[in-house]
Amino acid sequence: MNAAAGPIPAVPADPGDARLPWPAAPEPTTDPAVDAVLARLDGLGTLPVSEHEALYGSVHDDLFAELDSDTGSAG
């Protein structure tokens, strides 16, 4: 826990709103293929929690493959 930022609230500020603040979308990279993979996270907040693991796993695998494919072009 970052003492300067304080603890993350356990309940929403407005008890009538059951949603917690959602992180902002990541900033674009210089790689359109990576951006396309990351864009799949945009809808995460609308998925049931039971589907999050599958999406994160898929994004992880696709990012790994995309970034790994770039290593052959370094020179």
Image (spheres, helix red, strand yellow):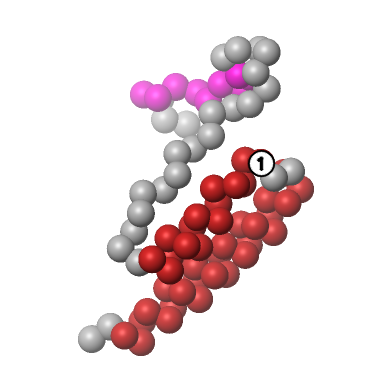
Q: Is residue 38 left or right of residue 16?
A: left
Q: How many marks?
A: 1
Q: Is residue 31 magenta?
A: no
Quarter the C terminus occupies: bottom left
Q: Nearer the viewer, residue 19 or 53?
A: 19
Give, as a single range, the part of the protein colored magenta.
4-12
Residue 2, percent across and down?
42, 30
Tag 1 residue: 46
Q: Which residue sits at x=49%, y=68%?
A: 63
Q: Which residue sits at x=60%, y=12%?
A: 14
Q: Nearer the viewer, residue 6 or 61?
A: 61
Q: Is residue 6 magenta?
A: yes
Q: Quadrant of residue 16?
A: top right
Residue 31, percent across and down?
35, 66
Element on which disc 1 rests:
helix
Name the amino acid type tagged 1. Thr
Residue 8, percent across and down?
53, 25
Q: Residue furthest right?
A: 50
Residue 32, percent across and down?
38, 66
Q: Residues within 10 Å of mark 1 (few under 14, many from 20)?
A: few
Q: Is residue 39 left or right of residue 18?
A: left
Q: Which residue sits at x=56%, y=21%?
A: 9
Q: Quadrant of residue 28?
A: bottom left
Q: Which residue sits at x=54%, y=70%?
A: 62
Asked if residue 59 is positioned above or below residue 51 in the image, the reply reads: below
